[in-house]
Image (cartoon, rainbow, N blue to C red):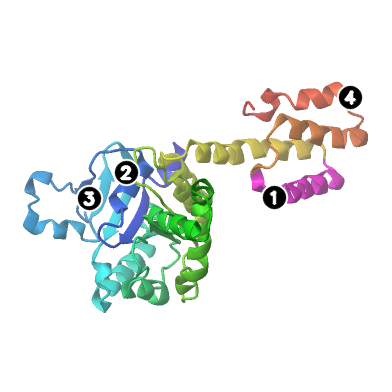
Amino acid sequence: MKLRQKCKHFRILIIGRANAGKTTILQKICNTNEEATIQDAKGNMIPMSTITPSNMRGMHDIEKSLIFPSNQGFVFHDSRGIEAGGKQELDIVQNFIAKRAKSHNLEDRIHVIWYCIPVDNDRIFTAAEKSFFDNLSRHGAPVIAIFTKFDHRDIESFMSLQEEGLEDAEAKAKASQHAKEVFEKEYLPDIYNLSYPPQRHVYLRDMQEPDSSVSELAERTAEVLENGVLRLMFVSTQRSSITLCIKYAIEQYVLPFYALLILYFPSRVVVKWFIDYRKKSHKGPAALMSRADVYQFACHVRPFYSLKSTDCFLLSLPGSCVVPI
């Protein structure tokens, strides 16, 4: 409840060419098949009955908001004009981001930018896309490059591996990784060597399939959000990855337990061991989350505080860890 009071909506600017799969991505992140409703800059709903083919293009004015009725925690802005690559279109996007960044209201700012780039043809990056990553200062809004239709690259890799003499089964098993390696070697430097490269990138495949997922996009988005309120807002609003929700729930509620544990055993040796353990685990802040980890921690401090074996066991019980393991 307090989180929603601080920020009622998570705002995303999505950019990309026509047929880049933007609508599908938005539906997947909200776990819905419904069409988004459109609101004007003042938040007034635009009745779909008033929309005709002649003014449909105007409905994608960057100032207008797209909201899915079943998940109103997300507010999306779609910028289609930038694919033309003209200076005027780029200026419109830059001014929109800059204006939003100056807002004193957190929920009115652009919180993340998703740039969708289809890779199903030989011309990976257009002049407009290179201009965006080379000229636009994004005023603190992190950018994630989304390479859509990557299954086409998988097919090319499969055929390439076949030509190298691999059997069909082996070529199929290695195609996805091979496609990724080739793409990262031959194409990614084209944008990562520009002035404003994306903070993260993801590959999306087979988005037309009902069971396809954007969970990796959700994970990368959570990673780039430095503001804790926005991160929790995004994680709790997205409906594409329950694993992501569990991960951040652990960080939010389980880690305080370990802080209390260190508080009750205030030894620099204990604190150092705790920090070293997390570094060795390479799992980030949620490293100590299993009963075995808690038991190991308790056993480590046992010699310093005369703990009994039963004490160590009791500390490792699920109830002691706040969240059942």
Q: Earlier in the sequence, mark 1 or mark 4?
A: 1
Foreground: 207 or 237? Answer: 207
The C terminus lies in quadrant: top right
Tag in front: 2 or 4: 2
Determine which residue is flagged by label 4: 308
From the viewer's perspective, is 43 left or right of 137? Answer: left
What range is drawn magenta here?
Answer: 266-285
Q: Is residue 100 magenta?
A: no
Image marks 2 and 3: residues in contact by CB distance under 8 Å: no
Choose the circle earlier in sequence order: 2 or 3: 2
**Residue 83's quadrant in the figure?**
bottom left
Give the residue drawn at x 69%, y 50%: 282
For residue 27, the mark is 2
Q: Residue at x 12, y 45 (%)?
A: 48
Horizontally, residue 69 falls left or right of residue 115, namely left
Which is more N-terminal, label 4 or label 3?
A: 3
Query: Of the numbered discs in the image, which one, if any, rests on residue 282?
Result: 1
Could you tell me the amino acid type at mark 3?
Gly
Give the percent coordinates (x, y) of residue 127.
33, 75
Sequence order check, earlier mark of 3 and 1: 3
How many angstroms separate mark 2 from mark 3 (CA)? 21 Å
What whole-number distance in Å separates the C-alpha atoms at marks 2 and 4?
54 Å
Q: Secondary structure under badge 2?
A: helix
Percent x, y of residue 213:
41, 43
Quarter of the image where the N terminus is located: top left
71 or 269, nearer to the observer: 71
Q: Amino acid at mark 2?
A: Gln
- The residue carrying mark 3 is 43
> Which residue is at a point 84% across and 21% down the rendered structure image?
310
- Residue 6's place in the image compared with 112, above or below, is above
